[in-house]
Image (cartoon, rainbow, N blue to C red):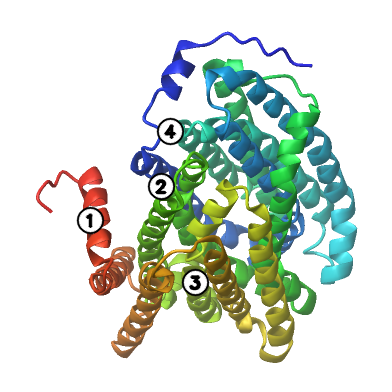
């Protein structure tokens, strides 16, 4: 049993006395960390594809997809640990927080270690059988699975330590750890891939980044909030709290992973690895922008967790207003990819990839906009302990995605990949609407849904497609320079943002939207008269 007596540290005391809801500052730190990670990853990816070849890069994508189901456990553990720690921030509850942390670490070591060993040993034989991989692309498949599994295990352990900072809304340290680990991973790729141009080298460099994250999170937590730490042990009460939230969240993460990896599995089973490579490149670009928007809104999870005692009207108001902000941001950031998909891929990875993958990038971007509409509601449901609702949303999304892929890919070829994501996201939106109607009994519920959720994403998609048609009519040269393509992306995103904001001024909630937008702009820009 872990002792409940603690020695308070002055820095930890100051952290807990901060303003609990500096949402914009937390979002900024998340955005900075993600922007650095995206910039480094996107810069290094053409180098990786050139050195490895599209086929070997496709094999690496298949190995990652095979290990991805393990993320259902690590993500569920991280989220449940964060939520339970966020409910135990008071000094009087520090003993309970230590018990919870000790139990989470033990679960990560025992269950996570077993999962990593299983994937490391059984992954390669099953992948050869399921994806018909043969020499030379599968020569290092065994080593690739061992390195990918090791990287996931480091990620699983580091997620528990990062939960300590996330629960306290200390996103500055979370961001710093993320940036350093990304720098280590990308630098190692530049050093090692030219010497050993294999899929296992790429995965080993990623694992090195995860190991760096674990070391940094462990060292920083010992120095800053050592009174929260405890040796690995199992406490029945803490285990029950984690399982209560985590079991449903495990199902939710499983459904989300099925939805995200379904196309890769079927492409690997039906076609050659290079098509998985083309799809992975398009998905990597769309995913970078999508996760960037998700990271900006990720701070809402501990924020909503701290609103347990607020009235339903207050929570609903914050929920829908936050949703509008992130929906406009998602429509602008992801919609900006749609008009410039061809020139961007041509400049980034070459003519062959641009010709093969630009249509998939457009479809995935539309799916990303649709999916972003549910992110805020997912954070809210999780923070309120409604993990069963999140599980239902994810499982239905996964079922619709997988079913569409299984039907479309054999008949329409690999470029039908992405349509399944759109189908899954539409099912996800419908499920969220039904659950919200059951959770809130508010006057004007449908009007709020239309104004804060459906209108910004619908306007964003329509404007992005119109811009794509206009850019194609202008017959833009595929070999444009970086500054020109970047300028077109910024222009497209700006136009989508302006149109979405302008349309949102109509209706009874237009004033609230404009007021929130002014607060955000005044927070980050030195403008006082907006």
Secondary structure at badge 1 equals helix
Contact, mark 2 vs mark 1 (Cβ under 8 Å)? no
Secondary structure at badge 2 equals helix
Q: Quadrant of residue 494?
A: bottom left
Closer-to-camera residue (24/308) = 308
193 versus 306 height, above or below: below
Closer-to-camera residue (239/261) = 239
Contact, mark 1 vs mark 4 (Cβ under 8 Å)? no
Task: Residue at 89%, 53% (x, y): give it.
Answer: 122
Q: Which residue is mark 3?
A: 370
Crowding around mark 3 (Cα neighbors within 10 Å: few <14, some 14 to 19, many 20+) is many
Q: Which residue is mark 1?
A: 515
Q: Which disc, if any, is residue 31?
A: 2
Q: CA distance from mark 4 to mark 2?
A: 11 Å
Residue 480 percent location from the top left of the image = 33, 73
Q: Which residue is mark 4?
A: 172
Secondary structure at badge 3 equals helix
Q: CA distance from mark 3 to mark 2?
A: 21 Å
> Looking at the image, is mark 3 or mark 2 nearer the viewer?
3
Closer-to-camera residue (324/206) = 324
> Looking at the image, is mark 2 or mark 1 nearer the viewer?
1
Task: Residue at 82%, 70% (x, y): give it.
Answer: 131
Residue 271 percent location from the top left of the image = 74, 78
């Amino acid at each position: 049993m872990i002792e409940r007596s603690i020695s308070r540290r002055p820095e930890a005391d100051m952290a807990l006395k901060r303003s609990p809801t500096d949402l914009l500052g937390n979002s900024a730190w998340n955005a900075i960390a993600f922007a650095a990670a995206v910039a480094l990853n996107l810069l290094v990816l053409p180098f990786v594809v050139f050195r490895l070849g599209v086929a070997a890069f496709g094999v690496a994508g298949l190995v990652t997809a095979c290990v991805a189901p393990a993320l259902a456990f690590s993500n569920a553990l991280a989220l449940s640990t964060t939520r339970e720690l966020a409910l135990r921030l008071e000094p009087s509850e520090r003993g309970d927080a230590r018990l919870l942390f000790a139990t989470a670490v033990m679960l990560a070591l025992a269950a996570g270690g077993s999962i990593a060993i299983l994937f490391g040993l059984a992954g390669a034989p099953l992948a050869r059988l399921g994806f018909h991989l043969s020499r030379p692309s599968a020569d290092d498949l065994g080593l690739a699975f061992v390195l990918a599994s090791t990287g996931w295990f480091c990620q699983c352990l580091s997620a528990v330590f990062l939960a300590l900072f996330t629960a306290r809304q200390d996103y500055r340290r979370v961001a710093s750890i993320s940036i350093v680990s990304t720098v280590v991973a990308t630098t190692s790729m530049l050093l090692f891939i030219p010497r050993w141009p294999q899929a296992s080298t790429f995965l080993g460099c990623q694992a090195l980044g995860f190991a760096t994250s674990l070391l940094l999170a462990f060292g920083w937590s010992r120095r800053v909030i050592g009174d929260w730490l405890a040796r690995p042990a199992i406490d029945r009460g803490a285990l029950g709290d984690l399982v209560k939230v985590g079991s449903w969240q495990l199902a939710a993460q499983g459904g989300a992973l099925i939805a995200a990896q379904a196309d890769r599995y079927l492409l690997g089973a039906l076609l050659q690895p290079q098509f998985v490579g083309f799809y992975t490149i398009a998905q990597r670009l769309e995913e970078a922008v999508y996760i960037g928007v998700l990271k900006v809104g990720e701070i809402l999870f501990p924020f909503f967790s701290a609103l347990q005692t607020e009235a339903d009207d207050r929570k609903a108001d914050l929920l829908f207003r936050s949703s509008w902000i992130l929906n406009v941001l998602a429509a602008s950031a992801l919609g900006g990819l749609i008009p410039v998909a061809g020139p961007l891929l041509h400049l980034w990875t070459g003519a062959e990839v641009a010709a093969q993958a630009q249509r998939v990038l457009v479809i995935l971007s539309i799916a990303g906009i649709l999916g972003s509409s549910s992110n805020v509601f997912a954070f809210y449901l999780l923070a309120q302990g409604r993990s069963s609702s999140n599980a239902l949303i994810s499982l239905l999304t996964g079922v619709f995605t997988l079913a569409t892929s299984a039907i479309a890919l054999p008949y329409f070829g690999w470029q039908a990949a992405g349509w399944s994501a759109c189908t899954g996201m539409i099912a996800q939106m419908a499920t969220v609407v039904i659950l919200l109607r059951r959770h809130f009994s508010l006057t004007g519920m449908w009007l709020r849904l239309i104004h804060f959720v459906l209108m910004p994403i619908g306007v964003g998609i329509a404007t992005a497609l119109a811009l794509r048609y206009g850019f194609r009519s202008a017959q833009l040269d595929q070999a444009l320079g970086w500054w020109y393509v970047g300028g077109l992306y910024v222009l497209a995103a700006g136009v989508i943002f302006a149109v979405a904001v302008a349309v949102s001024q109509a209706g009874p909630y237009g004033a609230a939207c404009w007021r929130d937008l002014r607060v955000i702009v005044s927070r980050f820009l030195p403008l006082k008269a907006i």
